[in-house]
Image: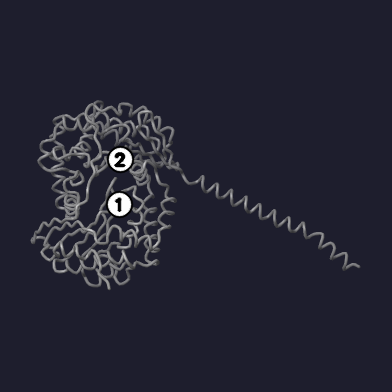
């Protein structure tokens, strides 16, 4: 009898135990959901506001004590012509030479008093002015940036002095053979189009650019709808919106002359060789037309570029390298260094390999590069692609570890895509790429395509262009 009572008591408890288990599961689910919500809240979003004049303000605020704020302008050497090539870069220099309310020395002293940094750069499609400062000094930094962009003085004395500075900068660039090769690569790949222009411009233009040229360029290109104000670090979004409204109110979208438009840039398979046997090493770039920023194939080409990798003699033994081209280059002593590249523009791009080699090794290095091109099109493996995806994702995320890097990412992506692609979305897109995707995209862009080639130095042993072109496909039985 006691046993029966004991059994009935146990049976009576069973529903309660099940309910307890169910309740425990619900509590764990609620806890997990709360944790997920907290995690999501801890990821700072990129907030975007468009002002009434068309300026876009984009920020990522993670509450740090330092910040980077900048003005990204959709204007660069691509918007120039043969007569004014170099004016965008010249204007970038002149912005720091004084304004209507500050002399150059006053500007420098104000920045130094803040302990901040003020910098700028010009590319083929963008001009950027930015400042790194303490979070509490963001209002002052934005006011200074607004002043130099809108009220540059463009005095004759300052123009003449800066003319000499730019000419010396050109001499420094000419001594950097990698820069020289890539300028030549653009000039041959995009011949007859604005993308063939160098960023600094020809010497004759630098000697002749005057205040009128600079003012016309400002009036035609520094327009509100082509500007993004970006901030990262300790930047309050609403505060930056108010600062942009009050400090950039002179910018508008009114054109006095013809409205500038983006000239389409066609790619031409061709070559340029600058033979100079006095140089010890040959510097060579081989590229095909890649994808634009907004093309769906861009990320797949980035994975393919990661598969080619980079290598130089300062690294450890090439035998241990996971990249096929690196192993071939190191074991065969084919080059001093090489690096793959994927340069994107609004409607086109350049994808390829740049290498530095002894003259007698050029032929063999080119052969191995093209063998690797064809392997990407036909037989790259899933394991290689998984490794490349992991490396590309890591490199992409590791580059976003400072406010300046994040601010640059925001400004550039707002101009290129019209929005900031969150890092987790980018990582997801990369991870969804398969080996078949890589083979298909590489076949589309690489297989039987005419390359652009630029070579500087002792390049006598570089194979004839037609021979290189004929190796852009495999004949198989």
Residue 4, horizontal then vertical, whole percent: 88, 67
Q: Is residue 35 left or right of residue 411?
A: right
The quadrant of the rendering that contains the C terminus is: bottom left
The residue to which callout 2 is attached is: 117
Q: Would you call the spot at circle 1 few (<14 residues within 10 Å), some (14-19), or many (20 or more)?
A: many
Residue 173, horizontal then vertical, whole percent: 17, 49
Q: Would you call the spot at circle 2 few (<14 residues within 10 Å), some (14-19), or many (20 or more)?
A: some
The quadrant of the rendering that contains the N terminus is: bottom right
Query: What residue appears at the point 40 percent right and 63 percent down from the top-left corner?
Result: 386
The residue to which callout 1 is attached is: 291
Do the residues under discs 1 and 2 have CB atoms within 8 angstroms?
no
Q: Is residue 210 left or right of residue 393?
A: left
Query: Real-space Cα distance between discs 1 and 2?
Result: 35 Å
Query: What residue appears at the point 82 percent right and 59 percent down from the top-left corner?
Result: 12
Helix, strand or loop at label 1? It is loop
Q: Tell us which disc is closer to us: 1 or 2.
A: 1
**Label whose residue precedes the other's in the sequence (1 or 2):** 2
Q: Could you say which disc has been placed on residue 333 in the image?
A: none
Residue 421, horizontal then vertical, whole percent: 40, 46
């Amino acid at each position: 009898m006691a046993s029966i009572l004991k059994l009935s008591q146990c049976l009576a408890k069973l529903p309660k135990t099940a309910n307890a288990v169910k309740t425990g599961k619900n509590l764990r689910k609620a806890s997990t959901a709360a944790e997920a919500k907290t995690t999501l809240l801890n990821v700072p979003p990129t907030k975007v506001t468009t002002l009434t004049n068309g300026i876009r303000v984009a920020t990522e605020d993670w509450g740090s004590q330092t910040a980077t704020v900048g003005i990204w302008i959709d204007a660069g050497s691509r918007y120039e012509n043969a007569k004014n090539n170099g004016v965008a870069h010249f204007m970038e220099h002149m912005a720091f030479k004084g304004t209507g309310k500050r002399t150059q020395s006053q500007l420098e002293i104000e920045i130094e008093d803040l302990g901040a940094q003020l910098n700028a750069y010009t590319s083929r499609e963008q001009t950027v002015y930015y400042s790194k400062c303490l979070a509490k000094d963001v209002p002052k930094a934005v006011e200074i940036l607004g002043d130099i962009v809108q009220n540059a003085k463009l005095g004759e004395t300052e123009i003449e002095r800066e003319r000499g500075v730019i000419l010396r900068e050109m001499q420094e660039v000419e001594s950097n053979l990698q820069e020289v090769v890539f300028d030549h690569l653009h000039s041959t790949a995009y011949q007859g189009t604005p993308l063939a222009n160098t960023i600094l411009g020809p010497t004759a233009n630098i000697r002749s650019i005057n205040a009128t040229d600079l003012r016309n360029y400002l009036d035609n290109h520094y327009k509100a709808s082509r500007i993004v104000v970006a901030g990262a670090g300790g930047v309050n979004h609403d505060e930056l919106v108010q600062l942009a409204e009050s400090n950039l109110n002179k910018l508008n979208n009114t054109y006095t002359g013809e409205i500038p438009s983006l000239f389409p840039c066609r790619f031409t398979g061709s070559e340029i060789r600058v033979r100079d046997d006095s140089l010890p090493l040959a510097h060579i770039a081989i590229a095909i037309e890649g994808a634009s920023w907004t093309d769906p194939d861009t990320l797949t080409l980035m994975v393919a570029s990661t598969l080619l990798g980079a290598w130089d003699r300062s690294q450890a033994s090439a035998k241990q390298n996971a990249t096929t081209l690196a192993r071939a280059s190191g074991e065969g002593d084919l080059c001093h260094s090489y690096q793959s590249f994927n340069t994107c523009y609004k409607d086109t791009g350049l994808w390829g390999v740049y290498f530095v080699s002894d003259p007698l090794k050029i032929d063999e290095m080119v052969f191995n590069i093209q063998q690797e091109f064809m392997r990407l099109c036909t037989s790259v493996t899933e394991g290689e692609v998984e490794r490349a995806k992991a490396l590309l994702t890591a490199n992409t995320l590791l580059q976003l570890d400072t406010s300046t890097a994040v601010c640059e990412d925001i400004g550039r992506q707002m101009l290129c895509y019209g929005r900031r692609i969150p890092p987790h979305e980018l990582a997801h897109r990369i991870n969804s790429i398969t080996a078949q995707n890589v083979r298909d995209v590489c076949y589309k862009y690489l297989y039987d395509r005419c390359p652009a080639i630029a070579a500087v130095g002792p390049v006598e042993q570089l194979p004839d262009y037609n021979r290189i072109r004929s190796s852009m496909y495999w004949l198989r039985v």
